[in-house]
Image: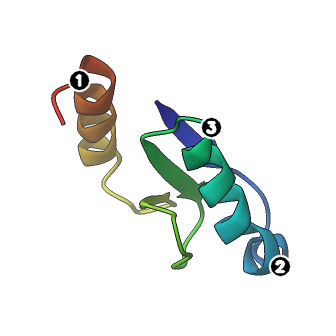
Amino acid sequence: KIACICGDDDTYQSRAAPLAQALKHAGAKTVWLAGKGSHQSVDRTLFAGADILAELAFAHQILEGVS
């Protein structure tokens, strides 16, 4: 239900959006990206300084079928 794309900023520029789309097509309900930036089909980002408690709560909702 949840996927996280991990890589480097240069790779994200060309591959994050198509990979996120493929993950959703394969059944991921939400796609995170490890890093900052906005990419099509990426729903959330995880990075140093992010509100990780809120992200974990969101993930729990997804996994429990609440959201």
Q: Residue at x 51, y 38 (%)?
A: 28
**Quadrant housing the C terminus:** top left
**For the residue labelled by badge 1, is the local secondary structure a helix, a strand or a loop?**
loop
**For the residue labelled by badge 2, is the local secondary structure a helix, a strand or a loop?**
helix
Chain-order first, disc 1 or disc 3:
3
The residue at which mark 3 appears reads as 26
- Badge number at residue 1: none
| Relative horizontal placement of residue 32, taking residue 16 as reference (left or right) | left
- Badge number at residue 10: 2
Q: Residue at x 30, y 55 (%)?
A: 51
Residue 61: percent from left, percent from top = 22, 30
Chain-order first, disc 2 or disc 3:
2
Res 3 → quadrant = top right
Res 63 → quadrant = top left
CA distance for labels 1 and 2: 34 Å
CA distance for labels 1 and 3: 18 Å
Q: Amino acid at mark 3?
A: Ala
